[in-house]
Amino acid sequence: MADFDGVEVAEGPPGSDLVEVGGELVERRGKHQRLAGVPIIMLTALSEEIDQVTGLEIGADDYIPKPFWPKRALSASSRGLA
């Protein structure tokens, strides 16, 4: 089985339920040992504090609300994938 450096997931149209979409990713990672070390970084238009807290509480490794600075996103991905 190949090692993963990262996984790109495009899910959740506007208005999607953050807990449903993010929770599904966290659950999928938990079920597959090969995904155990793959970080989940939520990049979303939901920028309220409650959204960020919820994203982290359901198991995301980082939460980046839009708009974001590209260096911030790169920092999160390099920390998670190092």
Image (cartoon, helix red, strand yellow):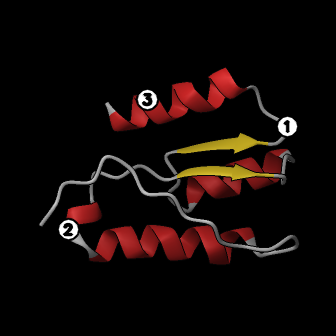
In which quadrant is the N terminus drawn? bottom left
N-terminal-most mark, 2 or 3: 2
Q: Of helix, strand and loop, which one carries label 1?
A: loop
- Residue pictured at 86% horizontal, 70% vertical: 14
- Residue pictured at 49% horizontal, 46% vertical: 61
10 above or below 49? Answer: below
Image disc number at residue 67: 1
57 above or below 13? Answer: above
Q: Look at mark 3 in the image and give the residue it sits on.
A: 78
Please give left or right for residue 30 compared with residue 1 in the image. Answer: right
Q: Residues within 10 Å of mark 1 (few under 14, many from 20)?
A: few
Q: Position of residue 34 (x, y in %)?
A: 21, 64
Q: Position of residue 15 (x, y in %)?
A: 87, 73
Q: Nearer the viewer, residue 11 or 55?
A: 11
Q: Position of residue 67 (x, y in %)?
A: 85, 37
- The amino acid marked with disc number 1 is Pro
Q: Of helix, strand and loop, which one carries label 3?
A: helix
Please give left or right for residue 30 compared with residue 53 in the image. Answer: left
- The amino acid marked with disc number 3 is Ser
- Residue pictured at 63% horizontal, 66% vertical: 10
Q: Look at mark 2 in the image and give the residue it sits on.
A: 33
N-terminal-most mark, 1 or 2: 2
**Label 2 to label 3: alpha-carbon separation:** 21 Å
- The amino acid marked with disc number 2 is Gln
Please give left or right for residue 4 compared with residue 47 in the image. Answer: left
